[in-house]
Image (cartoon, rainbow, N blue to C red):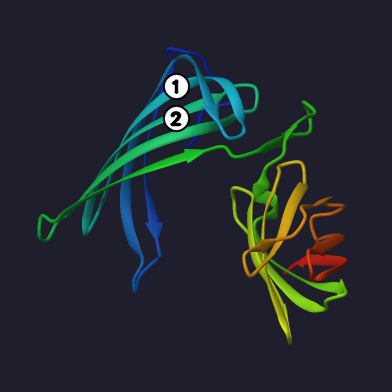
Amino acid sequence: MVALKTIAAGMNWQHAGVYETNCGFEPEQSTLEFKDVVGALERVTVPAGTFNALKITRNHTSNSATWTAVRERTCWWEPELGVEVKCIANTARTKKATGEKTSYADTYELQAFSNRALGRKVDSTLRFTGSWAGRLLGDAYGKCTAMFLPDGTIKGNCADSGFEFDLVGKVNPDGTLALNLVSNGVTGQTITGKFDSLQQISGTWSVPNHGSGTWVINQD
């Protein structure tokens, strides 16, 4: 259900078949038909970079015992990488028993990629996404938790008996980051560092009137 190995503007292909899903109480069979048409190269910018990609449009219909779905899909296929770097899809579904209609739209964009054969790689903050936990050492001791969001934003907290700090910052796609410990509206100096691995990073901390020390966090 993706483009052929070698494609060019003006090509088209179509597919028809039957597939079975097992997402509910009983398996459900559906028929599927689609036709793809390849347009000209277009310049497309997504988080992973800017690409010259072929525009491919698809008219897609599927029928099951309960639903009829019509989908219009436009994707941009990068011939060198052999992947779709962006897709926009609009789907309309009709429930056969009642005529009830629902519609929804989806957009997909390539966030990052690596291609061993070409030696090309684009790093992304997505690789750090998730929950992290660690500790403070030095003039203050405590446990820290943090959440790394997909855009690189870091939000967390460090606490122990007698003190509590908020943890805010940002990690960059290359693994460098800047953090601040904030207590009662007072922001400590900026802490900088870089990941030595995807599982751990450590550094030093300092907050005015609260002291200084070291810190380490590990991915949960």
Q: Distance between the residues labelled 1 and 2?
A: 6 Å
Q: Where is residue 132 in the image (x, y as percent from the top left)?
A: 71, 66
Q: Residue furthest toward the front?
A: 209
Q: Is residue 35 left or right of residue 80?
A: left
Q: Which residue is drawn at 72% across and 69% down?
A: 220
The three-letter amino acid code for the residue at tag 1 is Lys
Q: In this view, does 32 lie to the left or right of 115?
A: left
- Crowding around mark 2 (Cα neighbors within 10 Å: few <14, some 14 to 19, many 20+) is many
Q: Which residue is drawn at 87% across and 73% down?
A: 137
Return the residue at label 2: 75
**Which disc, if any, is residue 27?**
none
Return the residue at label 1: 55
Q: Mark 1: which secondary structure? A: strand
Q: Circles 1 and 2: CB distance less than 8 Å?
A: yes
Q: Residue furthest toward the bottom?
A: 161
Q: Mark 2: which secondary structure? A: strand
Q: Relative to residue 31, is residue 12 depicted above or below? A: above
Q: In this view, does 129 lie to the left or right of 61?
A: right
